[in-house]
Image (tube, rainbow, N blue to C red):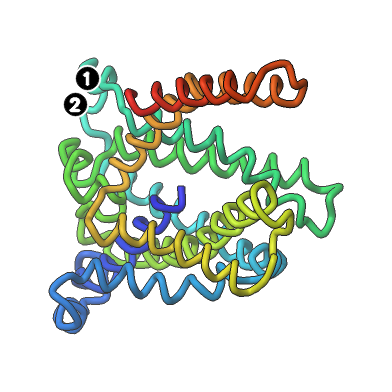
């Protein structure tokens, strides 16, 4: 999720700065490309410098307030999706049986990510100022996510940009729907939507890194979500550099989701059942260390073969 969010942010920032005003950008292509022969790499590095201080905060208090801005940006993005559907109109071939029957591994990757987001939600709500409102806030969050996925998926496939369903399979669409060329009449709404995406990612990415930090430190090492500035800075640097590498080397978000779905399914099928049994046997002291090591090696071998 963090890799996809970093790539999404870097792509949106690059599109916002490089594209002309008629294409929903600020028209700074010459100035932006003069910084480096790899503008996307510069965007990823700029995102890294912007996010590192936010990811190193001690608590979720400020990040929770910033997510109010992210919710406002979400409604701006939904408004653009609706405007795009109206401007492009219904594509006749979008309802053809062949188009409706195409499977999408990206969907499986998104579903796999959503499964693990449950544990992140628990981590986030531990820091809630009013725990009594957790159920209401979680329901509202899932409703907004459902609304976003359904609106983007349905409107983009039924009313593709410029009436061309093939544009959704282009290289630009593999990173962001907002990277696909839109009619000139949508230049200003597209500019606003891209700016909203940048702000939204800036508020969401630190929350993901905070969840990674909390689960890593509490479960494995210190039993404390903030053991000190140096360990937090070190872990954040590793996570941010890893996610930045995905963007710098040009991996598409759609490919990240595909591999995430495949890897998550592999872990859930082979690793989780064996891990649960291994932990139970270890807790009950019903198996020797040699037997537990053999089970662990077998599970690791299955994962490597997969």
- Report the side of 90 relative to 201 (left or right): left
Q: x%, y% of residue 211?
A: 61, 53
Give the image quarter of residue 186: bottom left
Label 1's element? Answer: loop
Give the image quarter of residue 250: bottom left
Q: Nearer the viewer, residue 154 or 214?
A: 214
Q: Nearer the viewer, residue 273 or 122?
A: 273
Residue under the image location 69 percent in, 65 percent down: 226
Q: x%, y% of residue 268?
A: 51, 24
Label 2's element? Answer: helix
Label 2 environment density (alpha carbons within 10 Å; few <14, some 14–19, many ≥20): some
Q: Nearer the viewer, residue 189 or 124?
A: 124
Measure the alpha-carbon separation of dots 2 and 1: 5 Å
Which quadrant is home to the C terminus? Answer: top left
Determine if residue 130 is in view. Answer: yes
- Report the side of 121 relative to 254 (left or right): right
Query: Above or below — where is 90 with respect to 209?
Result: above
Which residue is identified by label 2?
A: 93
Label 1 environment density (alpha carbons within 10 Å; few <14, some 14–19, many ≥20): few
Q: x%, y% of residue 126?
A: 76, 51
Residue under the image location 22 percent in, 19 percent down: 96
Tell me, for residue 190, which label it has, or none: none
Q: Nearer the viewer, residue 52 or 302?
A: 302
Q: x%, y% of residue 48?
A: 41, 71
Residue under the image location 27 percent in, 35 percent down: 90
Query: Above or below — where is 1 with respect to 65?
Result: above
- Report the side of 8 relative to 90 (left or right): right
Q: Are marks 2 and 1 in contact (CB under 8 Å)?
A: yes
Which residue is identified by label 1?
A: 96
């Amino acid at each position: 999720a963090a890799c996809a969010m970093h790539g999404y942010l870097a792509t949106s920032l690059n599109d916002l700065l490089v594209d002309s005003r008629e294409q929903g950008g600020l028209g700074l292509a010459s100035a932006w490309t003069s910084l480096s022969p790899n503008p996307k790499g510069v965007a990823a590095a700029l995102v890294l410098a912007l996010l590192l201080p936010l990811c190193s905060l001690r608590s979720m208090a400020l990040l929770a307030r910033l997510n109010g801005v992210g919710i406002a940006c979400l409604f701006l993005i939904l408004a653009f999706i609706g405007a795009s559907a109206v401007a492009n109109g219904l594509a006749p071939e979008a309802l053809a049986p062949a188009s409706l029957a195409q499977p999408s591994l990206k969907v499986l990757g998104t579903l796999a990510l959503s499964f693990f987001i449950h544990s992140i939600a628990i981590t986030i709500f531990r820091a809630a100022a009013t725990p009594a409102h957790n159920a209401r806030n979680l329901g509202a969050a899932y409703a907004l996510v459902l609304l976003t996925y359904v609106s983007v998926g349905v409107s983009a496939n039924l009313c593709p940009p410029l009436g061309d369903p093939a544009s959704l399979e282009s290289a630009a669409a593999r990173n962001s729907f907002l990277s696909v060329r839109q009619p000139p009449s949508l230049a200003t709404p597209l500019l606003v939507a891209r700016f909203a995406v940048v702000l939204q990612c800036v508020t969401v990415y630190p929350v993901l890194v905070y969840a990674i930090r909390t689960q890593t430190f509490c479960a494995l090492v210190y039993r404390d979500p903030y053991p000190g500035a140096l360990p937090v800075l070190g872990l954040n640097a590793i996570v941010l550099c890893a996610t930045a590498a995905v963007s710098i080397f040009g991996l598409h978000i759609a490919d990240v989701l595909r591999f995430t779905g495949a890897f998550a399914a592999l872990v859930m099928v082979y690793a989780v059942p064996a891990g649960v049994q291994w932990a139970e046997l270890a807790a009950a002291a019903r198996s020797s260390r040699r037997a537990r090591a053999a089970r662990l090696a077998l599970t690791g071998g299955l994962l490597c073969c997969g």
